[in-house]
C-alpha cells in the first residue's frame, strides 16, 4: 500500500527568513523558484516578501507542507539559494522560523528521529480517522417519517462488528447543496468513512450524486441500470452509485431500498478491508447490485451470507 505523505499544518506561521545573506542584483523570483524546488512546492506557492539589510524573508502561501521537505532541510535550502546569481550565502548563514517551519534547522540525526516519530503519530491518527464512520439517510419520505429508516441501524451495527466507531448522521433533505455541506462537515470533523443511502435514482429529486460531484469532481459513478432519459419520471439516463474522496474521507453513496443495501454491504466491506481505491470499490459495489436485476439466480450465496450477518447483529 502506498504510504501517504505526512503533512504539517503551518497554522499561520508561514515565514522563513535567511540571514545573514548578501544580495547583488539578485532576481527575487529566481530565489523563490529555487526555494520552491527544495520545499516541494509549486513556484507560485512561495514568494520573497522582504529583503531588509542582510535578511531575506520567504512566505509560504499554502497551509501545509510535507514533512520530508522541511525537516533538516536547511543545508539544501541554503545551497539552492547560493546557486542563484547575485546571492551570497556566508558560512554563518542560517534559516529561521517561529513556527513548525523551524524544524528545517534540525541536524540530520535529529531530523530523522522527528520524522520517524511524526510518521508513527500520523499513522495512528490516520488509522483512527479511517475507523470513524458516519451514516446518513436521505429522502423526503424518511425525513417526514413516512417510511422507516432500516438502513442506518443495519450499517452502524455492521460497521461496529468490523471495528468501526460508527454513528448516525441523521436524515438529509434531497438537496445537493445541503448534502455536500454534510460531506464537508463530516470530513472536517475527522470521519474517514461517510455512507449515504438513497437519492441515487433517476428522478430529478435524487440529488446525492450531484452533491458527491461537488466535493469530488473525479468521483466514480458506475451505472446499476440504464434506460431512456425522459421516460416517465426518469429525469436522468440511469441509476448509479457513487464513491468519492474528500481529503482523508471516503464517501460511498448507496441505494435506498434495504435489500440493495444488504447486497452492497458485502462488496463494500470487502473493499474497505483490502483498501480498494474509489474506482475499484465503486465497480465492485455496482456489480453486486446489478445481480438483483441481471442474475437473480446468483443471489443465493450472497443472500445467505447477509442473513447470517443480520442474525449476528440481532444476537449482539
Image (spheres, rainbow, N blue to C red):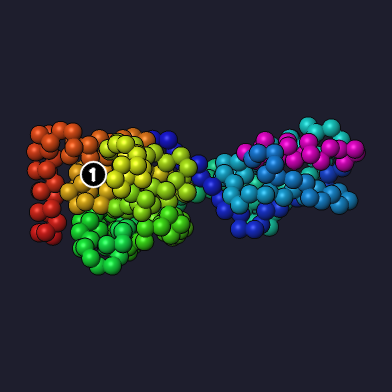
Q: Which residue is mark 1?
A: 264
Q: What residue occupies the far right of the structure in this picture?
A: 24
Image quadrant where residue 138 sits: bottom left
Q: Residue at x 27, y 62 (%)?
A: 141
Residue 32 shows in the view? yes
- Report if residue 109 lies within the magenta region: no
Looking at this view, is 197 or 94 the one in front? 197
* Number of on-image labels: 1
Most common SS among magenta residues: helix
Q: Residues within 10 Å of mark 1 (few under 14, many from 20)?
A: many
Q: What residue occupies the far bottom of the structure in this picture?
A: 145
Q: Residue at x 90, y 38 (%)?
A: 25
Looking at this view, is 207 or 90 the one in front? 207
Q: Residue at x 21, y 46 (%)?
A: 260
Looking at this view, is 23 or 275 the one in front? 275
Q: Which residues are magenta?
A: 23-40
Q: Relative to residue 114, is residue 292 drawn left or right?
A: left
Residue 62 position within the rendered picture, expressed as x and y whole percent measured from the top left: 63, 49
Quadrant where the image shows the N terminus: top left
Residue 287 position within the rendered picture, expressed as x and y whole percent measured from the top left: 25, 35
Residue 241 shows in the view? no
Q: Relative to residue 158, is residue 92 drawn left or right?
A: right
Q: Residue at x 74, y 45 (%)?
A: 47
Residue 237 position within the rendered picture, expressed as x and y whole percent measured from the top left: 34, 39
Q: Is residue 140 above or below residue 207?
A: below
- Report if residue 32 lies within the magenta region: yes
Image quadrant where residue 232 sits: top left
Quadrant where the image shows the C terminus: bottom left
Q: Is residue 22 above or below residue 207?
A: above
Residue 216 position within the rendered picture, expressed as x and y whole percent measured from the top left: 46, 45
Q: Is residue 221 above or below residue 179?
A: above
What SS does tag 1 mark? helix
Amino acid at each position: 500500500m502506498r504510504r501517504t505523505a505526512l503533512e504539517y499544518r503551518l497554522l499561520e506561521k508561514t515565514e522563513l527568513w535567511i540571514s545573514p545573506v548578501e544580495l547583488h542584483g539578485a532576481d527575487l523570483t529566481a530565489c523563490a523558484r529555487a526555494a520552491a524546488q527544495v520545499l516541494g512546492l509549486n513556484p507560485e506557492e512561495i514568494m520573497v516578501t522582504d529583503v531588509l539589510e542582510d535578511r531575506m524573508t520567504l512566505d509560504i502561501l499554502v497551509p501545509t507542507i510535507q514533512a520530508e521537505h522541511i525537516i533538516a532541510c536547511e543545508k539544501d535550502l541554503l545551497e539552492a539559494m547560493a546557486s542563484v546569481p547575485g546571492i551570497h550565502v556566508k558560512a554563518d548563514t542560517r534559516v529561521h522560523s517561529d513556527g513548525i517551519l523551524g524544524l528545517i534547522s534540525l541536524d540530520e540525526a535529529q531530523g530523522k528521529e522527528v520524522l520517524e516519530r511524526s510518521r508513527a503519530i500520523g499513522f495512528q491518527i490516520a488509522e483512527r480517522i479511517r475507523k470513524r464512520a458516519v451514516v446518513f439517510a436521505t429522502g423526503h419520505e424518511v425525513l417526514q417519517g413516512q417510511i422507516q429508516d432500516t438502513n442506518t441501524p443495519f450499517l452502524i451495527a455492521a460497521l461496529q462488528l468490523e471495528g468501526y466507531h460508527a454513528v448516525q448522521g441523521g436524515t438529509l433533505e434531497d438537496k445537493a447543496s445541503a448534502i455536500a455541506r454534510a460531506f464537508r462537515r463530516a470530513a472536517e470533523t475527522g470521519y474517514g468513512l461517510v455512507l449515504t443511502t438513497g437519492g441515487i435514482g433517476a428522478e430529478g429529486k435524487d440529488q446525492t450524486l450531484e452533491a458527491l460531484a461537488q466535493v469530488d469532481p473525479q468521483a466514480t459513478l458506475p451505472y446499476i441500470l440504464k434506460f431512456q432519459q425522459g421516460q416517465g419520471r426518469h429525469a436522468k439516463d440511469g441509476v448509479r452509485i457513487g464513491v468519492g474522496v474528500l481529503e482523508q474521507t471516503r464517501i460511498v453513496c448507496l441505494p435506498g431500498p434495504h435489500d440493495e443495501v444488504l447486497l452492497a454491504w458485502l462488496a463494500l466491506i470487502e473493499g474497505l478491508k483490502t483498501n480498494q481505491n474509489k474506482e475499484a470499490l465503486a465497480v465492485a459495489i455496482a456489480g453486486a447490485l446489478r445481480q438483483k436485476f441481471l442474475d437473480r439466480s446468483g443471489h443465493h450465496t450472497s443472500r445467505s451470507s447477509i442473513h447470517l450477518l443480520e442474525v449476528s447483529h440481532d444476537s449482539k
